[in-house]
Image (cartoon, rainbow, N blue to C red):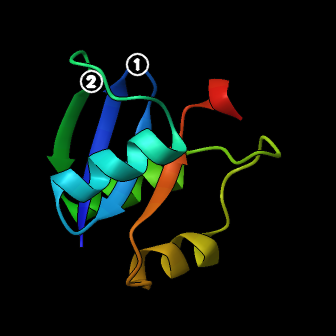
Amino acid sequence: MKFYEFTNPYYALIKAENENNAAKLYAKSVADIDEGVDVKEIDCDMALIKCAQALGEDNDYINSKEIYDDFIREEQEVLLIDYLLI
């Protein structure tokens, strides 16, 4: 799996097989995709750091076991989402 960081119009970190699948998941789970969407692939280490630094819905850091489980699971999924959408 690869990791894709979307930064505009809303932030999201998505784990997907490719950028096209990540864009579909972004459109389904985060926001419509317009021409202004900024996306870049980031490496696993950077994705892990971003997840470790993120706050969950309860305004506390995400449990390391939960982060680990998300990373080893072979599913495409949204790992982080803009707090404005929670």
- Inter-mark Cα distance, 1 to 2: 6 Å
Q: Residue at x 29, y 53 (%)?
A: 22
| Nearer-N-terminus badge (1/2) | 1
Compared across the picture, whether 38 is left or right of 28 comes to left
User: In terms of secondary structure, where does tag 2 sit?
Assistant: loop
Compared across the picture, whether 45 is left or right of 66 comes to left
> Which residue bears the numbered disc 2?
37
Above or below for 25 versus 10? below
Picture coordinates of residue 15 (x, y %)?
A: 34, 62
Q: Are marks 1 and 2 in contact (CB under 8 Å)?
A: yes
Compared across the picture, whether 18 is left or right of 22 comes to left
**Nearest the camera: 74 or 42?**
74
Compared across the picture, whether 62 is left or right of 26 comes to right
**Nearest the camera: 42 or 64?**
42
Q: Residue at x 37, y 84 (%)?
A: 74
Picture coordinates of residue 78 (x, y %)?
A: 48, 55
**Nearest the camera: 77 or 33?**
33
Residue type indicated by callout 1: Pro
Q: Residue at x 29, y 45 (%)?
A: 23
Q: Residue 9 — which label?
A: 1
Picture coordinates of residue 7 (x, y %)?
A: 34, 27
Picture coordinates of residue 83 (x, y %)?
A: 64, 30
Residue type indicated by callout 2: Val
Examine the image and state in which quarter residue 64 appears: bottom right
Q: Residue at x 37, y 53 (%)?
A: 14
User: In terms of secondary structure, where does tag 1 sit?
Assistant: loop
Examine the image and state in which quarter residue 3 appears: bottom left
Q: Residues within 10 Å of mark 1 (few under 14, many from 20)?
A: some
Quarter in which the C terminus is drawn: top right
